[in-house]
Amino acid sequence: MSPLMTVERATKHYKTQTGSVHALENLNLEIEKGEFICILGPSGCGKSTLLWAMSGLHELTSGQVVLNGTPVTSPRPEIGMIFQEANLLPWRNLEQNILFPFEIKKIDPAPAQPRIKRLLEEVGLAGFENKFPRELSGGMQQRASIVRCLSYDPEVILMDEPFGALDAFTRDEMNLLIQRLWMETGKTIIFVTHNVSEAIFLADRVVVLTPRPGRLAHIFPVDLPRPRTIEMTFEPDFIRSVIEIKRTIETGVYTPQAAD
């Protein structure tokens, strides 16, 4: 059975005011249907560049991203994206923000209303439909952006450091929430983060990139039972994985961590 999504020889150069930047080099990756993949690497290694290429919003210099057997050359209805900022429109209330993608795509939202209602209940936003973004906390705004993405039922969800701006307690809550939604929906999620513990907590596999230009340094399978709990992050095996992955990020080379 072929993978749902493949990244094939992805290479990206882009021009800036100060010269050319070599962001990615010959990166290959296969993602199975229903997988939760986290992408880690040092700052500037091309994690977000890779995610934007997967979304079809930015083209690669060479190589390709293939979804369901077809190259991704522009945004696709099967792909949803959640950003670090919730990007809610301040002049629209919560319900209007969630329905915004349907307006853009010229899709009738009526068939999706039961799903949206269920999602709002699931994320604790039922009853807030008429509130404006300024009336919601950062965590609530990000929950709304998750509902907005899931409302039109994409097959693949790309998440670019979605919880990076949240405090530690809210971030833990959001990680538990996204784990629960993923387990319930079976979506394929590719999640970029700088937080090693977050990546291990969420992922089936953690993909580590080298310093720029981003190449594949190592893929770490995460063999932890689900549903995972925050308490697991304090256990010796979890901490050993954190050390192993951090060392790989720092050096760009995988060195197994010896057992105690």
Image (spheres, rainbow, N blue to C red):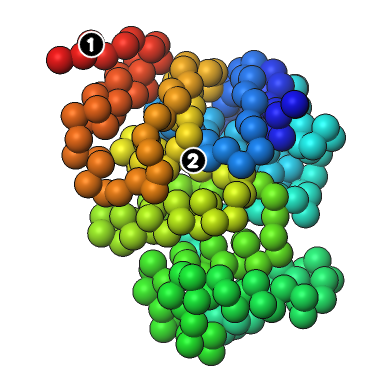
According to the picture, the residue beneath numbered tag 2 turns out to be: 192
Q: Is residue 86 visible?
A: yes
| Percent position of residue 179, x then y | 45, 51
| Percent position of residue 68, x then y | 79, 37
SS of the residue under disc 1? loop
Which residue appears at 69% of the width and 78% of the height? 113
| Percent position of residue 153, x then y | 69, 60
Say which label, 1 or 2, has the lower sequence index: 2
Q: Nearer the viewer, mark 1 or mark 2?
A: 1
According to the picture, the residue beneath numbered tag 1 turns out to be: 258
Residue 42 vs 175, above or below: the answer is: above
- Given contact means CB atoms under 8 Å apart, are the residues at marks 1 and 2 in contact? no
Q: Residue 124 lies in what quarter of the image?
A: bottom left
Which residue appears at 33% of the width and 60% of the height? 173
Q: CA distance from mark 1 to mark 2?
A: 27 Å
| Percent position of residue 191, x then y | 51, 42
